[in-house]
Image (spheres, rainbow, N blue to C red):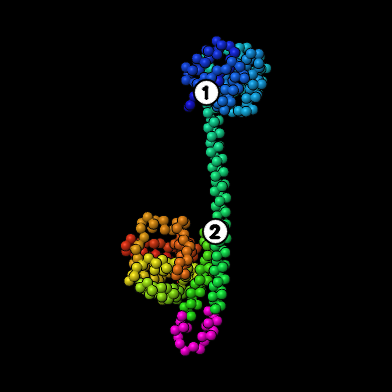
Amino acid sequence: MKNLSVLLIDSVPADLKEISRILSDARYTVHTASGYTEAAAIITRHSGKLVVLSELMVDNDCGHQFLKDTLKKYPFLPFIFTATSPPLKSVLGALRQGAYDFLRKPIPPVILLHSVSRSVQKLSLTLETEKQEKEIRKLLDRSREDLKDARTLSSFKGFMISMAAHDFRSIITVLDGNLQMIKDRCKGCEVSEPAGALEQASRTIGRLRTMSSTLLDYEAAESGSIRLDIHPFPLADTLKECVAFFRPYAAQKKVHLVLEMNSHDVTVFGDRGKVMEILDNLLYNALKFTPSQGTIRLSGAKEEGFAAISVSDSGAGIPKEKLRKIFDHEDIVATLDSHARLGLGLTICKRLVEAQKGKIRIESVPGEGTQVHFSLPAG
């Protein structure tokens, strides 16, 4: 334990010298004062971080008032009084006012050092407690500020997402109205190619509408309270629709997009819209990272009461460091690129799968491609 300073106050030079010698020999740093005014200046200079060993009467001044004034400013300061033949009333009065100990002169060195040692220990514990309390207060203040900033940021983020999604939906509504007008005018046309293009445009608008709903569900996905519409639906039709939607993009990139169905009668119990969102993200990621002449395989099968779905590509693959934290919250990405495809990150894909009581995993080897497998309850 660190030996703190001791302030010795005594008007008797011989006592002052002897007690100072005993404390110095015990490796205490000793400060001396022959009066209370001088002592008060020393205490202030040390911010009260010392032990006071004072004679009860110094130059006819009683130490009771000095004790009272000192403890008002430094309530943790240990104060020891000394006196040759003190009246009991004075001893009790000093102790009631907060004096730590009262020693009778002449003071045996053992008793003196024992009292000072206990006083130093008390002061050390008090100072350490005070230091810890200050650190805790700082941490609490910092935590409050961080929480306030986080709430503000979260609130702003939610507002921006909601505003963007509603604006997005408004534009889609106008676009859909124009498309319906064109389709109505094209009824009875003999040429089939415009009709096919319009049908594809209609499907694209449907996907954009789903994406706007996903943006509105973003906060729910973060909190784990995703809204689901669980109904049975055929897996084969869903996979075919996804492949048909991405085939033009795959052809543009000269990537082979293959659908493999090991069973055509698999019925999934889940939210079809959310499953489409998962497949959209997985297929888009696969197309983005698969080079020309590469291959992407989308497969579906039934395995032990679950619909097993896989998206495999022959792209660049994912490094091990990235693969380990691929589902981390920090990796959530929400961007709309030049192909009007919305990537919401594998973290949300994972939450959408798990919200439907399914599982998802990723296998990847750099330079050989990536496989994403997820399963959902099936009938």
- In the rendered image, residue 187 lying in the magenta stretch gets the answer yes
Q: Which residue is mark 1?
A: 5
Element on which disc 2 rests: helix
Image quarter for residue 74? top right
- Is 276 drawn above or below residue 42 in the view shown? below
Q: Main secondary structure of the magenta part?
A: helix
Query: How far is disc 1 from disc 2 in space, using C-alphas?
Result: 56 Å
> Residue 99 versus residue 214: which sits nearer the camera?
214
Coordinates of residue 321 in the picture (x, y in percent):
37, 55
> Residue 89 versus residue 123: which sits nearer the camera?
123
Question: What residue is shown at x 39% (from left), y 57% (from top)?
Answer: 322
Q: Which residue is mark 2?
A: 157
Coordinates of residue 43 in the picture (x, y in percent):
58, 24
Coordinates of residue 299 in the picture (x, y in percent):
38, 71
> Residue 45 versus residue 326: which sits nearer the camera?
45
- In the rendered image, residue 333 lying in the magenta stretch gets the answer no
Look at the image and tell me whether residue 6 can be seen.
yes
Check if mark 1's residue and mark 2's residue have beta carbons within 8 Å. no
Q: Name which of mark 1 and mark 2 comes first in the sequence.
A: 1
- At label 1, which amino acid type do we have? Ser
Q: Nearer the viewer, mark 1 or mark 2?
A: 2
